[in-house]
Amino acid sequence: MSDKLKISISGVRGIIGEGLNGQMVLNLAAAFGQSLNGGPVIVGRDARPTGPQMRLAVLAGLAFSGNDAIDIGLAPTPTVGLMVNQLGAAGGIQISASHNPVQWNALKFFNREGFFLNQEDFERFMAFYEKGDFGNATWDRLGKVTERDDAIDIHIDRVLNFVDVEVCRSRKLKVVVDGCRSVGGLILPPLLAKLGCEVIRLDCEADGQFTRPLEPTPAHLGALCAKVKETGAEVGFAADPDADRLAMVSEKGEPLGEDFSLALAADYIAGKTGSDIVTNLSTTMALDDIARKHGVKLYRTKVGEAHVVEGILKHGVKIGGEGNGGVIVPEVHPGRDAATGVAVICELLATKGKGKTISEVASEIPLYHIVKDKVPAREHEEGPIAEALCEKFGEPVFDRTEGLKLIWPDAWVHLRPSNTEPIIRIIAEAKSPEKAKEICSFTRSQLE
Ligand code: MG
């Protein structure tokens, strides 16, 4: 596979005109439609500049495979899944390359339950694509397109049904929203306004004219930090371009780190409901401490939203997600959702955080330091790397659920090939940033 095209269970991503082109997009949509055996497909997109052209190819592919399309327009990724469920559709396609740079775009596929495809669904769909068995609906069976403009309102209503709106309103938070010039700007401000917040907008025009690197990591949130300080807001919320990931900035204008989004939400919901928690292998050990504090279990799955969602449904938990800012409350929708995250944080600040700043609330979460690195994908032997790490840092517990994870009493390292980019990810966590860096860079040196 070229480094400009990535086909995986997470979807099909590529650089437009280099790895991914209009004909492929049309064929993929047609093959997906064919694999569904009829029924309407929900189609949405984030605000990237290539979205309108991608949309035309997707709608054409679905039409020629005989599937009706319900085009919900600009929408967060979780909104597409939620609308599949809401309307009883046969599947969904979101046009978004999430945090990949602007020249990328991608298709993400949802099954009839509104979840990302599992391995079996994905292989079935790919078999249609590879055989070229699609797009042959006869003239009287072509699919039709209808447009709806109420999807974001439906999504907001579901979130409002989950949280205690009156309690949230009592806090009257002053917040800044960094919409990343995409769909987060369409859902977060109206939702927060309904929760009684005074909302200051930053980059909330959903026009794809990106002003910052797209991952909502601390280094990219300078403008939000400045805006929070300048306006005296109590918290800043930032989304990625498809608004499934949430990051926060404290009232001091300092990024909390993406891990805090799930840690705070999980601490609050596990405390309130006694629910167990599900997360992936690469998420902070603070969640182990939080689970212990509330006497609940923490389940860890392979990395990737589909795996986490599968774990959430299997264990019947009320809260789960990923350390990259992906908060999942299955009662709203079993998928990562920045909108759900901000609403839970509002309720938290209005209840157990009453009278406290977000920094004070965050300081109650055990602090670890995560260091992430990546190297270009390459063949590598895990055995010698594990041996070198044991020799340097002591005997760990091994977890080989996915890639290689070594866990020490107060640190861990996880290396695995990315599902979405042609790279190997290295993630290390420890009580001090120096230790995390040391483990991470030593692991990297073993890959070079
Ligand atoms: Mg995303």
Image: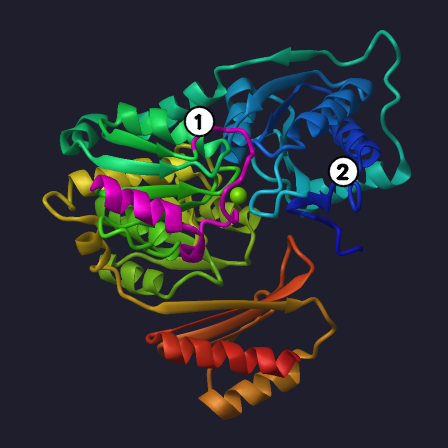
Crowding near pointer 1: few (<14 within 10 Å), some, many (20+)? many
Residue 381 rendering spot, x and y as whole percentages: 69, 79
Question: Of marks 2 and 1, which one's residue comes earlier in the chain?
Answer: 2
Label 1 residue SS: helix
Q: Which residue is mark 2?
A: 125
Circle 2 sits in a helix, a strand or a loop, which is it? helix
Q: Residue at x 57, y 43 (%)?
A: 98
| 415 in the magenta segment | no
Q: Residue furthest left?
A: 355
Could you say where residue 438 lies in the image, as x and y percent from the top left? 46, 81
Q: Which residue is mark 1?
A: 186
Is 139 situated left or right of 161 in this image? right
**Between 375 and 228, which is closer to the camera in this rendering?**
228
Against 215, residue 347 (above or below) is above
Quadrant for residue 436, please give it: bottom left
Query: Disc 1 marks which amino acid?
Result: Leu
Residue 273 visible in this rendered orientation of the protein: no
Give how far across and how far down residue 218 sits, in percent: 40, 56
- Residue 267: where, in percent of width, then height? 27, 52
Establish if 61 lies above or below 400. Answer: above
* Magenta stretch in the rendered image: 204-233
| Quadrant showing the N terminus | bottom right
- Quarter location, residue 166: top left
Question: Cβ(mark 1) to ligand 1 < 8 Å?
Answer: no
Residue 104 position by quadrant: top right
- The residue under label 2 is which amino acid type? Phe
Q: CA distance from mark 2 to mark 1?
A: 32 Å
